[in-house]
Amino acid sequence: MRVRSAAPLALAALVAVASLAPADAATKKKKKPLTKTFTLTMTPFPEMSETLACSSPVREAAKQFHTESIKVTGPGMLTVKVTKFTGDWDMAVWNSAGASVSEGSGTSTPNTSTDEMTETLKYKSKKGQTLNLRVCNFLGSQSATVTYTYVYS
């Protein structure tokens, strides 16, 4: 008699456990976005040549830039905004191999507007890696605010 009652109970337990497995997989938590905001103050590089843009290797000698390393552990989208400046600030992103993978778009040189400007950049990363965000004061006011967010996909 005991064997007959144990088999249905074991089958019921197995069905209950199997039905919970997909629910656990569906509730797997997504990684929290990385976000940071900071203010930069730097002197503009007094050169009108577009060859000294933030993504240019020549910019290395100028040193009017700030580099922020962003370590991401999986695929996702990096969004960067530089705000609260006038004139021309630029930005670019390099991968860990040193290749430029994205540049900001927004202002251009010369920019004589006295309105506050916004420079934006988006980069879709397919893997975990260290991204190097470079922000440059090309020919702008002395300070700007940088905000980046990396949202895992």
Image: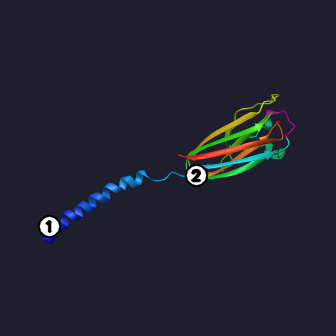
Give the residue drawn at x 24%, y 60%.
12
Asked if residue 47 is among those painted magenta in the image, a careful observer would answer yes
Q: Nearer the viewer, residue 148 or 121?
A: 148
Q: Considering only order in the chain, which callout, 1 or 2, is on the residue closer to the N terminus?
A: 1
Q: Nearer the viewer, residue 18 or 61?
A: 18
Q: CA distance from mark 2 to mark 1?
A: 54 Å
Asked if residue 38 is among those painted magenta in the image, a careful observer would answer no
User: Picture coordinates of residue 93 (x, y %)?
Assistant: 68, 44
Disc 1 residue type (three-letter): Arg
Work out whether 18 lies above or below 44.
Answer: below
Q: How many residues crowd around disc 1 within 10 Å: few (fewer than 14), some, or many (20 or more)?
A: few
User: Picture coordinates of residue 142 (x, y %)?
Assistant: 84, 41
User: Picture coordinates of residue 19 (x, y %)?
Assistant: 31, 55
Q: Nearer the viewer, residue 132 or 31?
A: 31
Give the residue drawn at x 63%, y 45%.
149
Which residue range is magenta in the image? 44-50
Residue that mark 1 sits on: 4
Work out whether 22 lies above or below 47.
Answer: below
- The nearer-to-camera label among 2 and 1 is 1
Which numbered dot is residue 128? 2
Under tag 1, what secondary structure? helix
Which numbered dot is residue 41? none
Under tag 2, what secondary structure? loop
The residue positioned farthest toward the bottom in the image shown: 2
Give the residue drawn at x 76%, y 30%.
108
Disc 2 residue type (three-letter): Gly
Left or right: where 117 falls relative to 9? right
Principal SS element in the magenta part? loop
